[in-house]
Amino acid sequence: MLIVMRPDATAQDIERVNDEIRRRGWHPHAIPGGSRTAIGITGNPGAVEPEPFRVLPGVADAIPISQPFKLVSREVKQEDSQVRVGDLTLGGAAIHVIAGPCSVESREQIISTAQAVKKAGATMLRGGAFKPRTSPYEFQGLKGDGLALLAEARKETGLLVTTEVKDTATLAAVADHTDILQVGARNMQNFSLLEAVGETRKPVLLKRGISATIKELLMAAEYIVARGNTQVILCERGIRTFENMTRNTLDLNAVPMLKALTHLPVFVDPSHGIGVRKAVPAMMRAAVAAGADGLIVEVHPDPPRAKSDGFQSLDFSEFEKAMGEVRAIAAAMGREMVRLG
Ligand code: PEP
Ligand code: MN
């Protein structure tokens, strides 16, 4: 249920509605809009009777929400949500590109990559420190040292940073060192982790699980938003299909579907999405053409020698060329690619 307040509703009217919701043992969620406030209800075991709310002062309407994801749904909020990261606004007219290595490997590697991706037009740096690897014998990341190197790269270049939070045990340390918390595909339904990042007030990049439906991705986002953290960006990163010529199948269908179903910004990860270095630029272009609000791309100074995901990482010149092409697609779509000063 969504309680829509009249534009002239007072703070007292809003509090009265909140009290009525709490009195029933449910939870009110304020959803600020351009011209009016709405209040979402969660925690209700069954359908909510609209009438007792419709008669309260300041209430314009009480609308049932048909989707199981409520707070992230377009039904609840028509305008696009924007996520503030430092001075950047993600999910606005501008398209943002987050770029960097799969894993932070050394000072030299992360700083040279940060400088190169910034020069090519990326507005944020990525780099894994705690890596979720399929094999326990593969490189697991530099962990705490990796976080410190990301902080150095941030200081050196001014690029804000995204890194993955792998579990609740390391959440506090990761949150201290990153501007966006990345929740990886393998953790999309780690509900304890979703609840814990929902308790923080850090922006979250939530990646779609390898076999997750669009609805499951939205339900995962709902876990985070229901805990009060509304700063969520969704990320399509490819799903597992029968096709094995590529690492995953980048489901660009998800972009227009998500844009219609939710007000949250939608990013695309073409690197994991296709998993083939030479094909990544085509999927960067396609994602922006499909309406993505941003990209997250793996870039490495020497892809064949990368400690993880070198086969899908662009080198500096490939990334720069791809960014030029993406800029043209963005312009054709009426979007701009901002550059840091
Ligand atoms: C990554 O970004 O390097 C990563 C592990 O992504 P995903 O969770 O999408 O596999
Ligand atoms: Mn990777």
Image: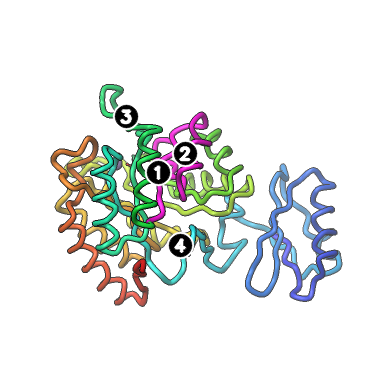
- Residue 317 lies left or right of residue 211; in this view the side is left
Which residue position holds label 4? 90
Q: Is residue 180 above or below residue 74?
A: above
Q: Is residue 184 visible?
A: yes
Asked if the residue at tag 4 contacts the one at tag 2, i.e. Cβ–Cβ closer than 8 Å, the answer is no
Spot occupied by residue 86 in the image (x, y as percentages of width and height): 49, 59
* Mark 2 crowdedness (10 Å alpha carbons): few <14, some 14-19, many ≥20: many
Which residue position holds label 2? 174
162 drawn magenta? yes
For the residue marked with disc 2, what is the amino acid? Answer: Val
Q: What residue sits 71% from the left and 52% below the top?
A: 41
Q: Is residue 174 above or below residue 336?
A: above
Which residue position holds label 3? 140
85 drawn magenta? no
Q: Can you tell me whether the CB of the residue at mark 1 lies under 8 Å from the nearest atom of ligand 1?
A: no
Closer to us: 41 or 183: 183
Considering the numbered disc 3 on the image, is that residue within a helix, a strand or a loop?
A: loop
Q: Residue furthest top?
A: 137
Spot occupied by residue 51 in the image (x, y as percentages of width and height): 82, 60
Label 2, label 1: how many angstroms apart (C-alpha)? 8 Å
Label 3, label 4: how many angstroms apart (C-alpha)? 30 Å
Q: Quadrant of ligand 1?
A: top left
Region rendered in magenta = 159-188
Asked if the residue at tag 1 contacts the one at tag 2, i.e. Cβ–Cβ closer than 8 Å, the answer is yes
Closer to us: 69 or 150: 150
